[in-house]
Amino acid sequence: AYWYRNVGDLTYGVGLSAPFGLGVEWADPEAWVGRRASYDVDLATVYVTPALSWKVEETVGVAFGLDIGYADIQLNKRSAVHFGTDPEADPYVDVLDARIEGTSRINVTPMMGLMVKASPKVTFGVMYHHQKKMEVRDGKLTLTNVAPAALAATVDGQIAALGGAEHDGKADLKLPHMLAAGVAYQATEKARVEFDAVHFGWGFFDELALDFDGTALDQTIREDYEDVLQLRFGAQYQVTPKLLAMAGYVRDESPQPVGSMSPLLPDASRNDYSFGLQLRATEKVTLTGTYMGVNFEERSNVEDGVHQSFETEFNPAGSYDSYAHIFGVGVGYRF
C-alpha cells in the first residue's frame, strides 16, 4: 500500500509493506513427527517507508527514504525426554510445551532509488534497501507441563528449578538487504513488459540466538543462509480504457541450506505465477483482483542416504513438497 503527492519536481509519500514473513502451522500437533522442532510458527515484518523523490530532469529521477520496520514472532514447540531405563529402546515422551513470543524494537535504515527514461519506450531503474537487525528485547518464554502422569511431578520440579514457567528473553533477527535493477519496455500504446533482478543479502542471516534469563534455556539455531538472486517478469495490457490485465512470473531461489531445513521452515526454490485484473470504477476509484500460484520444488534433507540437518535429534528426516494459492483484492482511491 502507498500514498503520494506531487509538488512541482518533488514527490513525497509513504509506503506500507511486509517484505518478509513466515507462517507454518502443522496439523495435529500432538502427533506431528516434527513437533519438537516446531508445530506452529508465525513471523511478521512490517516496513513503513516515507520517501522523497526529485525529478532531476525530464528523464532522470532519484529517491531517498527510510525503512521504519518492526517484527513480531511466535514459535510453539515441544520438548521431550526418554521415558524408561533404556535410551536405545524407549520412546521419547513429550514433557514440555514451549511458547516463545516477542516484538522487536523499531529499526530505521535507509533506502534509495534511481530511474532513467532512456527513450520514450525504455525505462531503467535501480532500488536499494539496507539490511536490518531486528532486536527483540521483550521476548517471553512460557513452559507448560504436558508430561504423562508418571512424570508430571518430576517435570514440575524441573520447571521450578529453572525459575518458573515464564522467562524473559531476547534475540536478534537479521533481515537481508535488497538490491533490485529493472527495465521496462512500452511495446505498444496498450502493452508494457518489465524484467527485474533482485539480489537478497541473506548471507547476513547466519544464526538465530535465543537468550533467556536462565542459561539452561538458551538456544542457538544455526542457519548459514546464502545470498540469492530473484528474477521477475511482468506484463500488462490495457484491454479497454477502464480495464487493465496483468500477468507475471517469478523464479525465486531459496537461500536456505539443506542443513537448516526443518519443520520450523522447510524452504525450497519455487516458481511463482500470477494474474490480475484492475478496473477503474470511477475517476478516483480502482478495484483490483489478483491470484498467485507458488509452486515449491520438492526438497529433502536426506542426501545419499545421510540426514544432512545441522540438528538431527528432533528434526525428522524426510521430503517437503508444497503449493500455495494466494488471492488478493484491492481498492485504490486517488485524492
Image (spheres, grey):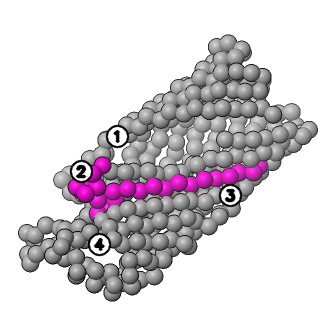
Viewer-nearest of discs 3 and 4:
4
Q: CA distance from mark 4 to mark 2?
A: 29 Å
The residue at the point 29 percent across, 72 percent down is: 145
Task: Tell which tag, 1 or 2, sits nearer the viewer.
Answer: 1
Q: CB atoms at circles 2 and 3 under 8 Å apart? A: no
Q: Please tell me how crowded label 1 is: few (under 14), some (14-19), or many (20+) other residues with Cα within 10 Å.
A: some
* Residue hosting label 2: 318
Q: Nearer the viewer, residue 146 or 59?
A: 146
Residues at badges 1 and 4 in contact (C-beta under 8 Å)?
Answer: no
Q: Secondary structure at mark 3?
A: strand
Looking at the picture, tell me which residue is in the foreground, 153 or 17. 153
Q: Which residue position holds label 3?
A: 68
* Secondary structure of the residue carrying numbered label 4: strand
What amino acid type is highlighted by mark number 3? Answer: Ile
Q: Secondary structure at mark 1?
A: loop
Magenta stretch, residue numbers: 27-51
Residue at left offset 33%, top offset 71% = 144
Looking at the image, which is closer to me, 184 or 281?
A: 281
Residue 42 highlighted magenta (yes or no)? yes
Disc 2 on helix, strand or loop? loop
Q: Quadrant of residue 108?
A: bottom right
Q: Image check: 252 left or right of 135?
A: left
- State the residue position of label 1: 322
| Pointer 4 residue | 145
